[in-house]
Amino acid sequence: MPRLAGRAEAEQQLSPCEKALTTARAGNTLSQGTPQLQYYVTELAAPLAWIDVAGHCTDRFAEGALRNAQSKMVVALLADKYGQSAPEVTPARLDGVTTASISASALDAMALAEDRAGFAIEVLAARGTTAGATLPLSDMHKTAAQQLVSLADTMHSSAHTDPRQKVYAIENLLANPVTIADKASEQNVPTTAAIEMDCSRAEIEAVTSTKAKPDTDTTMILAALVAKHAYTAMQLGYPSSDAALFEQRNS
């Protein structure tokens, strides 16, 4: 079977980035008319592969994290159709993470994004009129913020200053508790979904703007955190189209 042997050799020569991209995009290579069940089975591997893309491929952190969330939405929809379980998503926290090879400024920016989101959701939850705004979701953001601050303390000495402000301006949210204008999608989107996606984008900016690229393990851990917020946003009604996801929202 020389043809198969040659193919195996070629696959072995792929870089980790190329392998991850090949797996992540496998569903796109299926021919038209492929049974949808086969497409579903192929797509099952895509979410984790996109996290690998974020970790192994240079300048693909945002793509890997956001497409992880997109692919989870696809898998969840197909799983429901075929009576299967939706993708399991663990809490958007950093439980058990004790080290991270990334700058203190990046960790600070991520902590600030988490704390801001947690505060906004807590305020909206207290009002009781905003779908998806719950105290458990707020607490999850605040826990992640504390974990990021603790990582920065551990990695960058006890002289590190906590960046969290605890209280943030929320006039626009209070004026738009149900839906809010989203510049990236050019639509009104559910307010809680906008908060989650804004947190994702702020964390992407924190990671991609740091001068020293973090190691692969750190990158994948942070990509998974970003992806969970993006997936929550999509579950709450944020558009999962490429245009909405990949265009930065201007404040």
Image: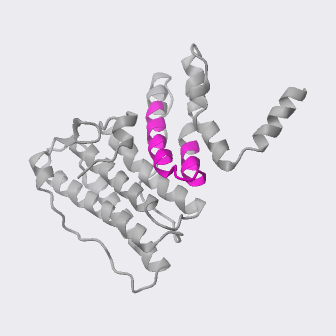
- What residue sits 67% from the left and 43% below the top? 19
Dividing the image into 4 quarters, which one contains the N terminus? Answer: top right
Residue 177 left/right relative to 149: left
**From which residue to which does the magenta span run?**
49-74
Query: Relative to residue 166, is residue 48 depicted above or below?
Result: above
Residue 57 painted magenta: yes
Predominant SS along the magenta part:
helix
Query: Relative to residue 170, is residue 38 depicted above or below?
Result: above
Image quadrant in which you'd find residue 45: top right
Measuring from the top left, give residue 152's x and y in whole percent. Answer: 43, 75
Answer whether residue 41 is visible to the viewer in this image. no
Query: Relative to residue 225, is residue 180 depicted above or below?
Result: above
Residue 108 painted magenta: no
Measuring from the top left, give residue 62's x and y in whole percent. Answer: 45, 49
- What residue sits 49% from the left and 77% below the top? 155
Q: Residue furthest top?
A: 33
Measuring from the top left, give residue 169's x and y in whole percent. Answer: 15, 61
- What residue sits 40% from the left and 35% below the top? 242
Residue 120 left/right relative to 153: left
Answer whether residue 28 is visible to the viewer in this image. yes
Q: Nearer the viewer, residue 225 or 186?
A: 186
- What colour scheme does the image use? one colour
Image quadrant in which you'd find residue 37: top right
Q: Residue furthest right?
A: 1
- What residue sits 53% from the left and 64% below the top? 213
Numbered circles on residues, count: 0
Measuring from the top left, give residue 25's x and y in whole percent. Answer: 58, 34
Q: Residue furthest bottom?
A: 159
